[in-house]
Amino acid sequence: MHSSASDGTLSPAELVARGKANGLQLMALTDHDTLDGLAEAEEAARDCGLPFINGVEISVSWGGITLHLVGLRFDRSRALISNALDEMQRSRTERAHRMDAQMVAHGLPSVFDEALSYAGNPKLIGRTHFARALVARGVCAHMQEVFDRFITPGKPGYVSHDWASLSDAMGWIRDAGGEPVMAHPGRYKLNATAHWALMQEFMTLGGRTVEVSTGSHNQDDTRRYQRLSVDLGLMASRGSDFHSPTESRCDVGRAPPLPDGTAPVWSEWTDLALLD
Ligand code: AMP
Ligand code: MN
């Protein structure tokens, strides 16, 4: 789930309260490319007695697409990961300026300042903030329209970007003692061969966990990745990918339960007392 430290609309403490109210047993905050929300979330979770682990969702360039690598339960004080993410945040700001320039060249208004004003964390600007700004300007009726018309690959405001390599991102998570998770694999536009190659590379690099149940998967995806996790001997993870009460299809804690036959990634964390 995402907080206002990246492109969610709720503060980390508000997300914790929502998670507690929705009956979470264990929570990870997984903001895009930043650790800035983790301290607030951890404190709020401690105050209300909700087991909490550090999380992050790192943007990765692989095989011509962008994919997301979640890291779970790592030491957020490690310099390698925090310095690397600082650098990614700087490159996000440059990318945002390029997006804005491309959209202006296409005849759209410049909305960089509004997009930044929607970013709860000025160091972390992304496409979601532009989508909110263009809806507020009346250019599009809703955020999906902004993505579909302007800011997905091939569209005029889309800027291709060099994110982290899969190997580097996995190294940062591992260096901090965390567990890398292949996030929402059903969302990636890869043919079967490339998809297979991705999972092989992920496993060769030490990857052991795939996200199976998520707000970003439909029922077919969930079944497919349950089978894949069983076939490849991978652990399974579950997450809402929640961004906002008004924008997200799946609320915090409302992703489908992990299907039978999967090994939850948290089953290894026997020192954590999950809530009943
Ligand atoms: P960014 O990391 O700045 O490229 O923004 C990525 C975020 O934009 C994702 O996590 C989604 O929340 C959202 N997003 C990406 N692609 C789409 C899409 N096609 N439709 C709606 N939202 C999208
Ligand atoms: Mn995501």
Image (tube, grey):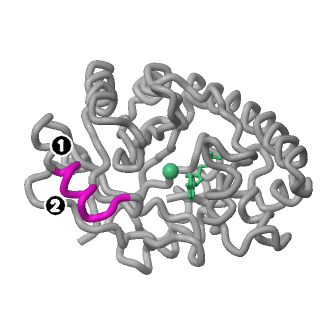
Identify the mark at residue 208; answer none if there is no mark.
Answer: none
Q: Label 1 amino acid? A: Ser
Q: Is residue 153 left or right of residue 233?
A: right
Dot 2 beta carbon under 8 Å from ligand 2:
no
Main SS, magenta region, reads: helix
253 is higher (above) or lower (below) than 122? below
| 112 or 189, nearer to the observer | 189
Q: Residue furthest bottom?
A: 21
Residue 35 drawn in magenta: no
Identify the mark at residue 259; answer none if there is no mark.
Answer: 2
Magenta segment, which residues? Answer: 217-226
132 is higher (above) or lower (below) than 58? below
200 is higher (above) or lower (below) than 3? above
Name the residue that disc number 1 marks: 229
Residue 207 visible in the displayed image: no
Q: Quadrant of residue 63?
A: top left
Q: Separation of disc 1 and disc 2 at Cα?
A: 11 Å
Seen at 58% across and 72% down, the residue is 247
> Label 2 near label 1: C-beta < 8 Å?
no
**Element under disc 1:** helix
| 66 or 20, nearer to the observer | 66
- Within 10 Å of disc 1 (Cα), the crowding (few <14, some 14-19, many 20+) is many
